[in-house]
Amino acid sequence: MLRLCIWMNIPSHYQTAFYAALDARPDVDLRVVYFNGASESRAAEGWKSNHDQKPFELFVDTAGSPAEWVETLDDWRERVHVVCGYFSSELIDWFCTHGTRWCHWSEAPGIRLAELLGYRTPLFRLLNPLMLAGKRAEGHRIQKHALGAFGQGHLARRAFQTMGISGAKIADLYYAPNGLRMAEPCGQILSFANGRKVFLAVGALCRRKGVDVLLKAFASLKTDGWCVVLCGLDKSGGEYEELASTLDIQDKVLFLGAYPVERIAEVYCAADVFVLPSRFDGWGAVLNEAASLGLPVVGSDLCGGAWHMVEEGCTGFRVRAASVRSLSSALRAYVRNPSLARQHGQAARRHYNGGFTPACNAERLAKALNEWCCE
């Protein structure tokens, strides 16, 4: 029996199905501990502000000490503890000094550097290896004290190795939201498209998500048979609506706004191609959602999930982050051959079902932990 405790800062609907899949396994005894509820900013983006707490979940008081947090679990000594991200160095220090079995789990580091640089991608590519080298003390702590490090795919694995963690102590563990069910397509999108094909982006409208890159790439296509739908909270103060007007594509771009997560399938089902042109995204779980509904996926090379959800030329295309030329080339392939979207979408659904479901992720975690615990 694998006695497991996962520590997270806040609940995430992207992890709910994965934790349920773990809890359903007869060989896993699961606890998930949270420090806070969803923030107001997340709620504004469509996340549920109230969390439906499961029997295996509990919250701890952030004002407490690591000892108090851990001792909310009577059997903490028998559990393997998986700490998500870098939100509590105090907790990790406590595990290290008390001989506790623990693992690290995170996306590739870099979001803070990217933000500091204003998401200027050439500078980020230049400085990111230096930033990671500066994290070798963290890497040494994981290498010396942890059972291992779970990474959100290729970008995280590469980053961990630069931090000094050996390949033998690294295993993949992705975001694994539940596949979405087909739904009645969003009427507002259908009305706007009016027979045109739809390129869809889901996420906050901000520089990090590459919204400007998408608008410029789409404008370069000069097509009347396609349109763009942007679904997400506009954090730009109207900047992208102004850009659409400047590019003379205002009648081809729908600013849908934030959409409730429990109804997001309606949005995907009204689209033909999904696009995530982020300048930085640790994973990008929207790629999973889109693929699960049979949409082809286009993602940037600085989006962790694009290295896994995209099989180049089969399920979609991986493009160079912040490159209008690279993205427009990918989009043009669908404009020139609309039937390609259906082919790639069918392959994307098979790809998702074959390795990226919550059950697949639960198996991935259990296998890695059992191997590390036996070493």
Image (cartoon, rainbow, N blue to C red):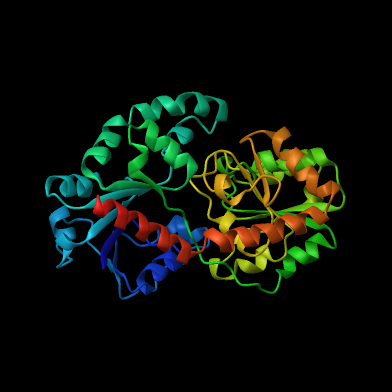
Q: Position of residue 356 (x, y in %)?
A: 52, 59
Q: Position of residue 168 (x, y in %)?
A: 34, 41
Front residue of this view, candidates 290 and 263 = 290
Q: Residue at x 18, y 59 (%)?
A: 69
Q: Residue at x 14, y 49 (%)?
A: 99
Most distant residue in the right direction: 224
Q: Is residue 142 visible?
A: yes
Front residue of this view, candidates 159 and 197 = 159
Q: Residue at x 61, y 58 (%)?
A: 351
Q: Number of numbered discs present?
A: 0
Quarter-wise, where is residue 2 in the image? Answer: bottom left
Q: Position of residue 155 (x, y in %)?
A: 48, 40
Residue 223 lies, with reference to residue 131, above or below; the image says below
Q: Position of residue 6 (x, y in %)?
A: 30, 59
Left or right of 95, for residue 267? right
Q: Is residue 258 visible?
A: no
Left or right of 294, for residue 176? left
Residue 216 lies, with reference to residue 297, above or below; the image says above
Residue 34 lies, with reference to residue 310, above or below; the image says below
**Where, quadrant-wise, is the N terminus in this rendering?**
bottom left
Front residue of this view, candidates 212 and 150 = 150
Front residue of this view, candidates 94 and 101 = 101
Left or right of 132, for residue 372? left
